[in-house]
Image (tube, helix red, strand yellow):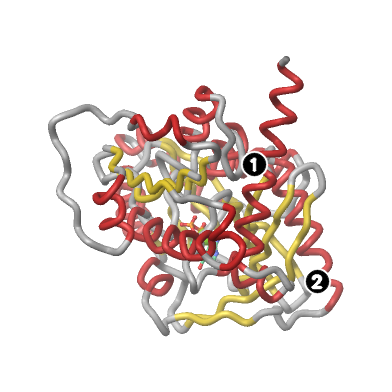
Amino acid sequence: MGLVFGGRSGEHEVSILSARTIADALSAGANGQRYHLLLHYITRSGRWLVGDGAKAALSGAVTPEPDDHLPCLPTTAQQVDVWFPVLHGPNGEDGTVQGLFTLLNQPFVGTGVLGAAVGMDKQAMKAVFATAGLPQVPHVCASSSTLSNPHGLVNQVEQDLGYPCFVKPANLGSSLGISKAKDRKALLAGLHAAAHLDDRLIVEAAITARELECAVLGDSTMDVSVAGEILYGGEWYDYTTKYSPGASSVVIPAPVPQAVHDRIRCLAVQATQAVGAYGLSRVDFFYQDNGHVLYVNEINTMPGFTSQSMYPMLWQASGVSTEALVHRLIQLAQARHQRRASTIA
Ligand SMILES: Nc1ncnc2c1ncn2[C@@H]1O[C@H](COP(=O)(O)OP(=O)(O)O)[C@@H](O)[C@H]1O
Ligand SMILES: [Mg+2]
């Protein structure tokens, strides 16, 4: 079992924490007999480390960047029978590593290239959700190249969305690069800041809503967890709030009417299928209880897996332990690989 973590991503640290939870779950109980873990750590510059280097990284040590070779797959990859890529954000949750394992013809946990790429890019994701008829907050897509002459874009945002609005790079995660703009000056500052991180940008009308999340697990048939709610004190759920202990809390199941709960579960599967994802996903919602309005915010095809993360907690609350969850994910990966092999043969 090849556990891949770290990665050339702003969510490098989160990936290490997620991998720790998964490594523990893969070593516990019956999983300890089933799986022999081969740790594969990808450094911030994209080099792969195995053995003691990877072990040290998993336990939180800062490992020096090897600078003597190009990023390449270590030979230990030959011993791996199934991969578990626990990479969040760019260069891991976006189809890149999924493409690598597909080329290697080795099974891997989670969605394939298409679902990862579409799920990662907020412009593509929103376009696909719109085609599937999923409810979304009004938004405008933009390109960093328009910022040399932003008047048209600013006018469009002011006319179609107004203030406040959220400015987002299309391809990050964990709220990185996102800002809330309350006036034109902040909008322009937010667009320039986001454009440093991505060429593809999104501006979205800011709404006042509760934040609910739901977990999906499966392949041709998909199981859905109960929905959970995130509570936090600040204005919005930014990076610091997400990862500072005590800054946010979760309520599972979310205290919402049963009909809303049912609709969330249904929309979570529809969103997952719309982007062509399978394996696992977490679908996030905005809920305005005044009028019971639901919007799909986003899908995460490799959701956070730390001990405090929603994805494993939603499954625990739905009767699936993290130990059973990781075993199931590996079984799904192997079953899909076998199906794919027999289709190609
Ligand atoms: N349109 C919006 N209205 C209100 N809050 C928003 C909106 N878009 C984003 N936010 C806030 O910003 C957070 C991060 O945005 P999100 O699109 O989920 O990015 P990420 O992929 O980085 O998690 C959300 O959880 C929410 O708190
Ligand atoms: Mg989010």
The percent position of residue 266, horizontal first and vertical second, equals 81, 58
The percent position of residue 326, horizontal first and vertical second, equals 60, 57
Residue at image x 50%, y 45%? 1
Label 1 C-beta lies within 8 Å of the nearest ligand 1 atom: no
Any mark on residue 56, and which? none
SS at circle 2: helix
Pick out the residue farthest to the front: 33
| Residue 163 can be seen, yes or no | no
In space, the residues marked 2 and 1 are separated at their CA atoms by 31 Å
Any mark on residue 260, and which? 2
Q: Is residue 18 above or below residue 49?
A: below
Q: Is residue 322 above or below residue 196?
A: below
Residue at image x 67%, y 57%? 296
Q: Which residue is at the front of the view, 285 or 70? A: 70
Q: Residues within 10 Å of mark 1 (few under 14, many from 20)?
A: many
**Left or right of 154: which side holds 279?**
right
Between label 2 and label 1, give the one nearer the viewer: 1
| Mark closer to the chain start, 2 or 1 | 2
**Left or right of 110: which side holds 5?**
left
Any mark on residue 333, and which? 1
Specify the quadrant of the image occupied by residue 71.
Answer: top left
Exactly how many numbered labels are in the figure? 2
Q: Is residue 35 above or below residue 262?
A: above
Q: Looking at numbered disc 1 in the image, what kind of residue is underneath it?
A: Ala
SS at circle 1: helix
